Image: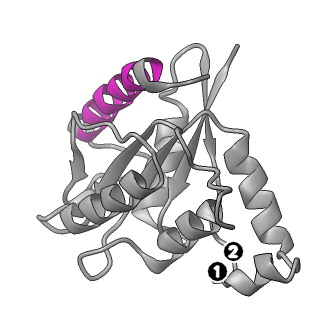
Amino acid sequence: MQKVIGLIAGSLRKESFSKKISRTLVSMAPQGFEFKIISIENLQVYNQDFDDDNIVPESYVKFREEIKNIDGVIFITPEHNRSVPAALKNAIDIGSRPAGKNIWNGKPGAVFSNSPGNVSGFGANHHLRQSLVSLNVPAMQQPEVYLSHIDKAWDENADLKDQGTKDFLQKAVNAYVEWFKKNSNS
């Protein structure tokens, strides 16, 4: 049975590097796995009143259903002010609510962070890992995936041209698949 791994890019920007990385990862899925991009673009800011008053936005319903139907998740995130982008944190919160209905629970995860600078999203990577602990998402420890100078890795068609980055991403995908096999309940 095919395992479905959700790819969630933490940036809303149309030409974001996280989205480009996500599109690149789709083709790296090994046999028996499907990598599926899950959008967070249309999610309203989380408000518990939506759940409490049973007026849940359709975007929440669709997103929660998509997350329920995946077996694992790879978060691809930039860094905003030494943390995860608000849109990504919002998506995580939507999936963890209402209380007692955490749809992230037990899904093996990984964090791939990126930045045009030298630090390569280190702060975002580690802040996201803190949230994943709270959600019972086991996160792959090695290899750690920090992609620096990601702005220079693409050609004019938004294809990954940097072979070193491509090779490293494939290594990380392979490691995640092995991590998934050891940590999956499905």
**Please, what is the three-letter code of the amino acid marked with disc 2?**
Leu
Q: Nearer the viewer, mark 2 or mark 1?
A: 1
Mark 2–mark 1 Cα distance, whole angstroms, equals 8 Å
Q: Position of residue 18 (x, y in %)?
A: 43, 59
Task: Verify CB contact (< 8 Å) between mark 2 and mark 1.
Answer: yes
Query: What range is drawn magenta here?
Result: 165-181
Which residue is outermost to the front? 100
Which of 48 and 59 lies nearest the eye of the viewer? 48
Q: Main structural element of the magenta stretch: helix, strand or loop?
A: helix
Left or right for 120, reference 107: left
Residue 84 vs 1, above or below: the answer is below
Q: Residue 78: name its quadrant.
A: bottom left
Label 1 crowding class (10 Å Cα cut-off): few <14, some 14-19, many 20+?
some
Q: Position of residue 25 (x, y in %)?
A: 47, 38
Q: Residue 134: name its quadrant.
A: bottom left
Query: Residue beneath label 2, please?
Result: 43
